[in-house]
C-alpha cells in the first residue's frame, strides 16, 4: 500500500512539474513575442520618422530647385542678369564651343563645333549642368535647336516652348529638302501629326501618331511621282497598335485602283466586296518599300 502511494506521489510530481514547466515556457515565449512586437513597432516608427524627414528634405530641395529655375529661366528669356561669355578652344587650337553664363549658370545662346572645325549644333539653352568633351550635360532647351552634319548642312530642327517641352521636330535631306516633320499635339506629348517627304520634294505620307510607334486616325501615303499610294484609318486605342479599320484603298503609280477592302481587327473582311489582297493593302504603308522607291 505504501509502495503504491509513493508511486502515485512520484507520478503527481512528475506530471505536475511538467505542467508547471510548460506554463513557465509558454509564459517566456509570450514575453518574447511581446518584446519582438514592441521592437518591430519601434523600428517601424523610426523608419516612418526617417522617411518623413527624407520626404521633407526632398520637397525642400524641389522647392529650392523650382525657385531657382523660375528665376534663372526668367533671366535667360529676358537676357538679364550678370552675363559672362565663354569660349572653349581645344589643344589643337580649334574652337569647340561658345556659350554663356547668367549669374554663374549656363543659359542662353550656344554653338558647338566638331574636332575638324565643322559646326555641330546651335540653339538656346534654358539650363545645362556643365560643358564637357564637346557636349552639355543635363540640358533643357527653348526656342530652336539646329543640328548639322559634317558638311555643315542643316539636318535637324527641334522647336521648344519656353518651359523646355518639344513643340515640333523637322529633319532634312543632304540636298536641303524636307525629309520629315512631327508636330506634337501639345508641348511634350508623344502624340501628334507625322509627315514625311521624298527627296524630290513630293509628299510620302501624312498621318497621326498616338505614341512614337502607334498610328491612330486617318492616314494617306503617296508614290514618289505624287500619285496617291493608299489611304485608310488606323485604330490604336485597343490592345494592339496600328490596327487598320474601315475601308482601305490602294492605287498604282498611274492612279489605277489595285486594292480595296474593309478591315476589322486588322484583317480584311472577306465577306464584304474587296479587290486585291490583304497583303497588298498592308504593304502600301511599308516604310522600307517607300524608302526604296525614293532611291
Image: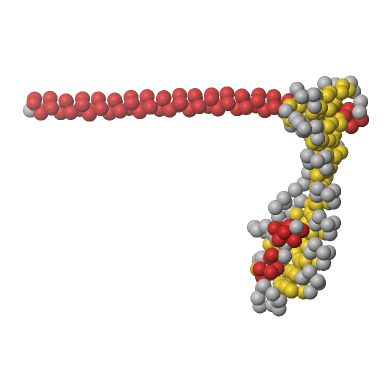
**Horizontally, is 286 left or right of 49 in the view?**
right
Viewer-closest of 242 and 253:
253
The image shows residue 184, relative to residue 268, as above or below, that is above
Q: Quadrant of residue 202?
A: bottom right
The image shows residue 122, relative to residue 213, as above or below, that is above
Viewer-closest of 152 and 39:
152
**What colouring style does the render use?**
secondary structure
Quadrant housing the C terminus: bottom right
Identified at 66% across, 65% down, the residue is 266
Identified at 53% across, 27% down, the residue is 41
Identified at 76% across, 31% down, the residue is 115
The answer, for residue 234, to whether it is visible in the render is: no
Image x and y of residue 40, in percent: 50, 27
**Horizontally, is 182 left or right of 41 in the view?**
right
The image shows residue 31, relative to residue 234, as above or below, that is above
Image x and y of residue 216, in percent: 74, 58
**Horizontally, is 173 left or right of 55 in the view?**
right
Amino acid at each position: 500500500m505504501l509502495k503504491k502511494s509513493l508511486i502515485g506521489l512520484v507520478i503527481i510530481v512528475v506530471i505536475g512539474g511538467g505542467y508547471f514547466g510548460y506554463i513557465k515556457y509558454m509564459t517566456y515565449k509570450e514575453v518574447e513575442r511581446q518584446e519582438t512586437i514592441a521592437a518591430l513597432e519601434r523600428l517601424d516608427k523610426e523608419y516612418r520618422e526617417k522617411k518623413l524627414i527624407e520626404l521633407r528634405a526632398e520637397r525642400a530641395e524641389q522647392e529650392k530647385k523650382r525657385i531657382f529655375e523660375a528665376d534663372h529661366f526668367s533671366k535667360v528669356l529676358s537676357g538679364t542678369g550678370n552675363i559672362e561669355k565663354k569660349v572653349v578652344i581645344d589643344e589643337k587650337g580649334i574652337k569647340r564651343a561658345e556659350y554663356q553664363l547668367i549669374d554663374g549658370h549656363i543659359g542662353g545662346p550656344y554653338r558647338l563645333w566638331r574636332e575638324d572645325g565643322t559646326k555641330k549644333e546651335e540653339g538656346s539653352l534654358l539650363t545645362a549642368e556643365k560643358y564637357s568633351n564637346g557636349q552639355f550635360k543635363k540640358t533643357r532647351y527653348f526656342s530652336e535647336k539646329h543640328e548639322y552634319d559634317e558638311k555643315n548642312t542643316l539636318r535637324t530642327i527641334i522647336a521648344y516652348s519656353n518651359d523646355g517641352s518639344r513643340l515640333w521636330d523637322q529633319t532634312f535631306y543632304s540636298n536641303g529638302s524636307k525629309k520629315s516633320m512631327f508636330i506634337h499635339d501639345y508641348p511634350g506629348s508623344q502624340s501628334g501629326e507625322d509627315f514625311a517627304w521624298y527627296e524630290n520634294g513630293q509628299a510620302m505620307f501624312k498621318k497621326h501618331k498616338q505614341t512614337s510607334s502607334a498610328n491612330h486616325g486617318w492616314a494617306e501615303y503617296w508614290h514618289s511621282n505624287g500619285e496617291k499610294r493608299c489611304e485608310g484609318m488606323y485604330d490604336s486605342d485597343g490592345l494592339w497598335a496600328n490596327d487598320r479599320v474601315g475601308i482601305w484603298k490602294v492605287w498604282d503609280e498611274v492612279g489605277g485602283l489595285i486594292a480595296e477592302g474593309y478591315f476589322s481587327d486588322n484583317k480584311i473582311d472577306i465577306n464584304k466586296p474587296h479587290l486585291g489582297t490583304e497583303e497588298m493593302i498592308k504593304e502600301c504603308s511599308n516604310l522600307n518599300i517607300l524608302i526604296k522607291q525614293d532611291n
